[in-house]
Image (cartoon, grey):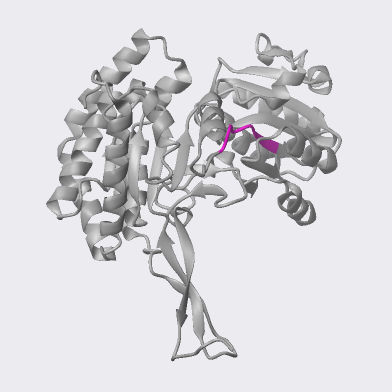
């Protein structure tokens, strides 16, 4: 099926599902060496095809600009030399990770004589729906392969050429080592009906991972019959405590907001303790504006009183509305609020945050421990940029997504998040009385 040929999507999707289920069962027989050999074969094919992939990405970028994609989506869509090299390194990193499959833990003897424990096993078949970010195609494929799962990938139409070029390399790599070409299947249609089929194919798909805008993830969560690993948005906070180191506060705040805008771990709200706000808030605001002259600050009343007469910030300030505290901007916009202390900061974050990633800047151990205990987020950090909330930075090799749910996985989802455990029992003829 080509991009243009979207007839009989149901038949196509069920064929893909059957192939994925069969491939997942065959993959269960592969050992760690087999999987690592496949990852490195894909690496070599991908490296040789670099110019073809970048050329395909340019086609997507040109179309995206013609279709007036916003800056955040274009940023996610672009593959440059650095990102391509990162994709290659990601394959090596995943290959170097310990294989979780087959790990046995918690072995105990019971009074009956049986010996039992838990074995880590693949989930089976993963379905992934995502927008832009063609590098996700490779990251998801590598994590699924290493964790023993087959995967069905449905990228956005804006990245169709890039995804198909990467898929060709993955297929060739799998063929080189004799593994099923259906372990990784990148859908060859952009018909939205394919998504509706994928998220309801309970006979063939064990979990769905959506990555993209809030509207996409809300739709998937509402309509899916297959379990979903997800986060809706990334409304991340940095709280500058009264005991913060000033230089760390400035450096971390600038990085958390201006490093990249189109990511779910970018700071969207800055909270500053009122006892240090008069001195520290102007320095942080000036540094953020200096990093990007397009930045706009949305201020509460106390922040306005401190910053409105600052000539260096003229043209960058406006009053915050109630909506600003709940918004993931994905743009050079930052909400700023002065709070009375850590109690108000924690309450604000738990009320308005998205439970993704939140940061405290402080040298006070007691308050830092309160913050990490009481802030209900998937990642909670002390004196570090929220931009570290990422599977690669967490040593997972890559991530298939980030979950703000509490079951089955939370935070960046790597190899272990794509596995489950089953009970295993060793007996010697025991029978139950």
Q: Residue at 44% across / 53% down in the picture? A: 418
Instruction: Residue 300 in the image: state x and y as whole percent.
Output: 79, 21
- In the drawing, does residue 396 fall left or right of residue 285? left
Instruction: Residue 127 in the image: state x and y as whole percent.
Output: 40, 41
Q: Main secondary structure of the magenta part?
A: loop
**Quadrant of the image for the C terminus?**
bottom right
Instruction: Residue 154 in the image: state x and y as whole percent.
Output: 36, 32
Instruction: Residue 135 in the image: state x and y as whole percent.
Output: 34, 36
Q: How many marks?
A: 0
Q: Write down the quadrant of residue 268 in the picture.
A: top right
Residue 19: in magenta span: no
Q: Residue at 69% across / 24% down in the picture? A: 335
Segment colored magenta: 231-238
Closer to the camera in the image, 145 or 353: 145
Residue 411 drawn above or below residue 133: below
Residue 298 drawn above or below residue 167: above
Residue 233: in magenta span: yes
Q: Residue at 15% across / 55% down in the picture? A: 177
């Amino acid at each position: 099926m080509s991009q243009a040929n979207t007839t009989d999507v149901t038949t196509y999707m069920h064929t893909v599902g059957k192939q994925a289920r069969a491939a997942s069962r065959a993959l269960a027989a592969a050992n760690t060496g087999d999987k690592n050999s496949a990852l490195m074969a894909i690496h070599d094919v991908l490296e040789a095809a670099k110019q073809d992939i970048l050329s395909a990405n340019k086609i997507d970028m040109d179309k995206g600009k013609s279709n007036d994609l916003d800056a955040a989506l274009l940023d996610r869509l672009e593959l440059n030399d650095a990102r391509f090299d990162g994709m290659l390194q990601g394959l090596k990193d995943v290959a170097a990770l310990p294989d979780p499959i087959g790990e046995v833990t918690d072995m105990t003897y019971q009074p009956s004589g049986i010996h039992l424990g838990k074995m880590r096993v693949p989930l089976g078949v993963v379905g992934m729906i995502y927008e832009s970010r063609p590098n996700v195609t490779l990251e998801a494929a590598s994590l699924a392969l290493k964790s023993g799962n087959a995967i069905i990938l449905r990228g956005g139409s804006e990245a169709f050429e890039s995804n198909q070029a990467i898929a060709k390399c993955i297929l060739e790599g799998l063929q080189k080592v004799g593994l099923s070409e259906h372990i990784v299947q990148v859908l060859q249609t952009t018909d939205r009906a394919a998504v509706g089929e994928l998220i309801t194919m309970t006979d063939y798909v064990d979990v769905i991972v959506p990555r993209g805008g809030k509207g996409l993830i809300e739709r998937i969560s509402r309509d899916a019959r297959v379990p979903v690993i997800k986060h809706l948005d990334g409304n991340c906070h940095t709280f500058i405590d009264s005991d913060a180191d000033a230089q760390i506060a400035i450096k971390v705040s600038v990085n958390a907001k201006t490093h990249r805008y189109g990511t779910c771990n970018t700071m969207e709200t800055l909270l500053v303790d009122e006892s240090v706000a008069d001195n520290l808030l102007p320095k942080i605001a000036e540094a953020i504006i200096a990093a990007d002259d397009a930045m706009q600050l949305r201020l509460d009343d106390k922040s306005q009183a401190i910053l409105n007469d600052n000539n260096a910030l003229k043209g960058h300030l406006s009053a915050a509305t109630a909506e600003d505290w709940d918004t993931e901007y994905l743009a050079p916009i930052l909400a700023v609020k002065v709070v009375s202390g850590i109690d108000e900061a924690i309450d604000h974050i738990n009320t308005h945050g998205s439970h993704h990633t939140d940061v405290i800047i402080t040298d006070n151990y007691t308050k830092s421990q309160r913050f990490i205990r009481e802030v209900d987020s998937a990642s909670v950090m002390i004196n570090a940029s929220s931009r570290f909330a990422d599977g690669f930075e967490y040593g997972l090799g890559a991530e298939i997504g980030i979950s703000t749910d509490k079951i089955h996985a939370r935070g960046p989802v790597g190899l272990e998040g794509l596995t489950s455990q089953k009970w295993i029992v060793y007996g010697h003829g025991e029978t139950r009385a």
